[in-house]
Image: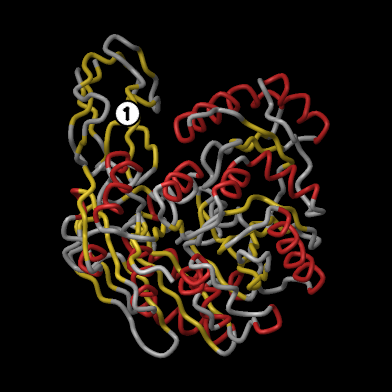
Amino acid sequence: MPEEIKAHITGVVFQLTTKPGDRVAAGDAVIVLESMKMEIPVEAPRAGAISEIRVREGQTVQEGDVIAVLE
Amino acid sequence: MIGTVLVANRGEIARRVFRACRQLGLKTVAVYSEADRGALHVRDADEAIAIGGAPARESYLNAERILEAARRARADALHPGYGFLSESWRFAEAVQGAGIVFIGPRPEAIRTMGDKIAARRLMAAAGVPVLPGSFEPVADVAAAEAVARDLGFPIILKAAAGGGGIGMARVDAPADLAPAFATAARRAHAAFGTGELYVERFLERPRHVEVQVFGDDSGNVVHLHERECSIQRRHQKLVEESPATNLPAPTKAGLTTAAVAGARAIGYTNAGTLEFLVDENGGFYFLEMNARLQVEHPVTEEVTGVDLVVAQLRVASGEPLPWRQDEIAQRRAAIECRVYAEDPSKGFLPSPGTVQRLELPSGEGIRIESGVEAGSTVSVHYDPLLLKLVVHGTTRQQALERMAEALDRCMIEGVRTTIPLLRRVVASDEFRRGRVHTQMLEQGAFNA
């Protein structure tokens, strides 16, 4: 069952720490956002494989935006 | 005397500097990013110049654009505020090279103090106590481990080009060193362009006490007493006060003497702050020097009655220090609370957005330094500091009562703020008794 991973804060995508095909454990950083001079990881809610990354570095995302999809 | 001052900053600090300029009859120039078009600091200035996009590197960190604005406005002086380019010696040098007075220390002093290892060496040579640790960068994990073995764990890794807690990592055991080293080096590299690290002994439950200093072109250096800044998260301050409570007299005397000696050793001019850690026995150790005006400077102003920013403008114009050491006394007690757009109930997660409602206290002993008003946008691109609430009292007790009441009367809606946490800090028995240390907030001392 694919699951959308959403940004929990508004920020700018600082770093993509995973790519499609990567396996992640629950709590792994999928991407890192930068907001107000802080680096904030968006974590995988459960273990699985990343099927899609929907953002690129430097892009502004709003709280609730889908940033990736977990297989 | 200088005539036109450009402030290369935004928010509350730009407004603070403009106020001092007006007091001296100086013309003011603001610069602003696309995100700050309607900001308060833009309206405060006599002239405002757009310098680029919302991301700081396109605007407030863009030295070229700022210098261009200064030339266009015929500014003959520039105040960097804090953050952004304030501690870039290259920027200070470029400002001077353009024939503009840099309101701050000489570029060489900024350069030396920006190199945290050079600063450690220099302070140690000047007789200022420093923490045991490395006086050279540690090249790799093995080098760090060799130093750590001598010191004993826990140790702390710090960025040689550091500041603001970036690239710092506590290490409790040899096995944790390699991953901590990698993370700290990566963070340091991202923030400062160099991943160089050094090692210091990690102090348990220290207090952060700093000393405000001021120097002029003739080599006069004075101190303006201490500020206690132990209430921190992520190595960044939330509450500051002066005088520091429960500071043994010999420690206080040692700190101010060391601060003046340290500032003299580098021929420091203008306003600066030497930061120290104080251990449970009253021993103190130099941490770093901030070669600029600090966020918490109003605490010192409220306690001593001096205007540090006006003094900065005068001294930068070539005037001598406006006070002798024996004229600077701690006349009152003052406390500052920093109101950040962060959610303290969620680990201080940033809370950008729009300020929907803003009601702030006023009255006897209350001073507000704010960069926002109702309707202001709090951008993801900048530091989350919204405003500073500063109170003074004849006694610390009076200042505490005033702060508690002032915080109760602060109403901010639209973004989450640190106010609920600040209320708990000021109400807590530990804070009231002055039993504070830098780790207590993150250890949960003020949790709801």
Q: Is residue B354 left or right of residue A16?
A: left
Residue at the image point whose x is 37% and y is 70% from the top? B16
Residue at the image point whose x is 30% and y is 54% from the top? B70
- Quadrant in which the C terminus of chain B is drawn: bottom left
Residue B201, percent from left and from top: 74, 41
Residue B118 in view: yes
Name the residue type under label 1. Pro
Determine the chain carrying the residue at label 1: A
Which image quadrant is residue A56 in?
Answer: top left
Q: Is residue A3 left or right of residue B80?
A: left
Which image quadrant is residue A24 in?
Answer: top left
Residue B427, percent from left and from top: 50, 74
Q: In the rendered image of this protein, does residue B6 appear above or below residue B132?
A: below
Q: How is the image coloured?
A: secondary structure
Pick the residue in front: B177 or B44: B44
Q: Is residue B343 left or right of residue B264?
A: left
Which image quadrant is residue B24 in?
Answer: bottom left
Residue at the image point whose x is 28% and y is 31% from the top? A13
Quick one: label 1, few (<14), some, or many (20+) residues within 10 Å?
A: some
Marks counted in the figure total 1
Q: Is residue B322 left or right of residue B97?
A: right
Q: In the rendered image of this protein, does residue B299 appear above or below residue B437?
A: below
Residue located beneath label 1 in the image? A45
Q: Residue furthest front?
A: B99
Residue B124, percent from left and from top: 79, 47
Pick the residue in front: B57 or B138: B57
- Quadrant in which the N terminus of chain B is drawn: bottom left
Residue B212 in view: no
Pick the residue in front: B279 or B300: B300
Residue B181, percent from left and from top: 60, 26
SS assignment at label 1:
loop
